Image (tube, rainbow, N blue to C red):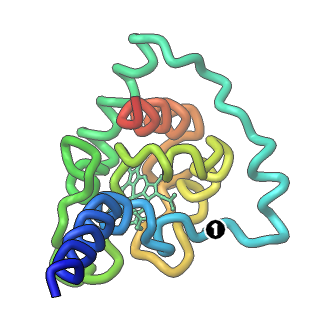
Amino acid sequence: MPWKIGTLCLYGLFFQSLLPFVSEAADPEVLKQRVPQDQIAEARGWKNPFPSTPENLGKGKRVFHGKAFCVTCHGRDGKGLGKIPGLVGKLPRNFTDKTWQAARTDGELFWILKNGSPGTDMASFIPLVLSEEEAWHVLLYVRAFGN
Ligand code: HEC
């Protein structure tokens, strides 16, 4: 029946329009809370003491590409590398995803740099690799991927 084909096409268009969301933001793993419930209120209260000036962003960029080797997993464009051997299913998220950016406070991201991200291969970086100051700078740079 001809009308059925029309209906199918409409469904097709509908699902296609959902695809960009399905492939990124709708992945529940991406938005899952990583900070334990008993620490989340405290972590969300932490504010980045450094303003996002070109100078501070530059410091964050140097950390991201340099001593903290964030770039090796999160990619030059912040989109993650897509496939890292041994990390299948736990791939770094896309830092340019605005839904993810909006879902996290700076304090939560800082908590993750301090403690690692439970359930993922993201390790703890403070204090072994980064000082707290360097961590806040690199987070300014992570935030800039969302602009
Ligand atoms: C060995 C690879 C690797 C390195 C190096 C690495 N990360 Fe990650 N990172 C991951 C993985 C895997 C995850 C977990 C999946 C995810 O959350 O994207 C993650 C998660 C994160 C998250 C949490 C995202 C969230 O909301 O849950 C942040 C923020 C982050 N990384 C920032 C950094 C920064 C900044 C650096 C450098 C200081 C860094 N990462 C270095 C692999 C890495």
Asked whether 84 or 70 is in front, the reply is 84
Q: How many marks?
A: 1
Say above or below: 102 vs 26: above
- Is the C-beta of the residue carrying label 1 under 8 Å from the nearest atom of ligand 1? no
Asked whether 137 or 91 is in front, the reply is 91
Q: Is residue 145 left or right of residue 66?
A: right
Q: Is residue 143 left or right of residue 126?
A: left
Taking the spot 79% from the left edge, 71% from the top edge, the residue there is 37
- The quarter of the picture where residue 142 lies is top left
- The quarter of the picture where residue 66 lies is top left
Q: Residue under label 1, please give it.
A: 33
Q: What quarter of the picture does the N terminus occupy?
A: bottom left
Residue 103 image point, x, y percent: 60, 51
Q: Amino acid at mark 1?
A: Gln
View extreme (top): residue: 54
Q: Splitting the image into four quadrants, where does ligand 1 fall?
A: bottom left
Residue 44 image point, x, y percent: 76, 48
Say above or below: 58 vs 140: above
Q: What quarter of the picture does the C terminus occupy?
A: top left
Taking the spot 51% from the left edge, 81% from the top edge, the residue there is 119
Say above or below: 4 vs 39: below
View extreme (bottom): residue: 1
- The quarter of the picture where residue 49 lies is top right
Residue 46 image point, x, y percent: 75, 40
Q: Secondary structure at mark 1?
A: loop
Q: Residues within 10 Å of mark 1 (few under 14, many from 20)?
A: some
Taking the spot 21% from the left edge, 42% from the top edge, the residue there is 77
Residue 72 image point, x, y percent: 20, 55
